[in-house]
Amino acid sequence: MKRLYPLVLIIALSSCLGYKELPVEYDYSYKGNFKKYRTFDLMKSGNGDLSMTNEVIEKSIVSRMKFLGYKQNEAKPHLIIGFKMFTDSLMFNGYAQPEIEDWAASKVEPLNYEKQKFELKTGTLLIQFYDRRQNRSIWQGYATTQYGSIDFNNDRHLRNAVISILDKYRFWAEGFLEGGSVDPEKEIIP
């Protein structure tokens, strides 16, 4: 039995070493009700755009959202989550904002958004959250590597990118931590 402990320790440590946090930027809408969402679904790409469909990314998003207590619901989800893989480099407009947790705690709405331009390298993953009821994007995170591109053909790279991005979205589903039963069909009341 004593021989088994070092083996378990090695396996546990090696699984942690496989994760490398990527540089992530994110921005959000001051209109987001981040503490009031309970359900989500994935955006369906109706135009056959392969940069918006990937089974590994979809499973990773679903897994993370369920971990945060969100229920997947195709009928009237609170959040619709979409993603896009960019294989070319691009200039991306983002915003300089307070950390989302700080802003959500105070809910002080600045009068304007400070625009920032990001030069993103090849192999960038963008994940966006849409508030279905407000019909607007309320959060987006994007990751690229500093030393090369995300390999969209490598499942580990894809899972790593999703984890890195969604680590910046730190809101539990409403009612999840309290352990109460919340009706997922109930609409959000602002």
Image: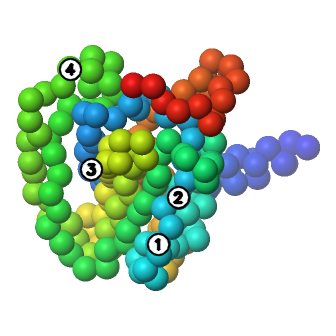
Number of the front mark, 3 or 1: 1
Judging depth in this view, the residue of 60 and 42 nearest the camera is 42
Looking at the image, is mark 3 or mark 4 earlier in the sequence? 3
Residue 57 in percent (x, y) is at 52, 65
Looking at the image, is mark 1 or mark 4 earlier in the sequence? 1
Looking at the image, is mark 3 or mark 1 earlier in the sequence? 3
Give the amino acid type for the residue marked by disc 2 in the picture. Answer: Leu
Asked if the residue under mark 1 is in contact with the one under mark 2, i.e. CB atoms within 8 Å, the reply is: no
Secondary element under disc 1, as helix, strand or loop, is loop
Residue at image location 48% in from the left, 30% down from the top: 188
Secondary element under disc 4, as helix, strand or loop, is loop
Residue neighbourhood size for the residue with mark 1, other residues' Cα within 10 Å, grouped as few (<14), some (14–19), many (≥20): few
Residue 10 in percent (x, y) is at 68, 52
Residue 182 seen in the current view: yes
Looking at the image, is mark 4 or mark 2 earlier in the sequence? 2
Residue neighbourhood size for the residue with mark 2, other residues' Cα within 10 Å, grouped as few (<14), some (14–19), many (≥20): some
Residue at label 3? 25
Residue at label 1? 45
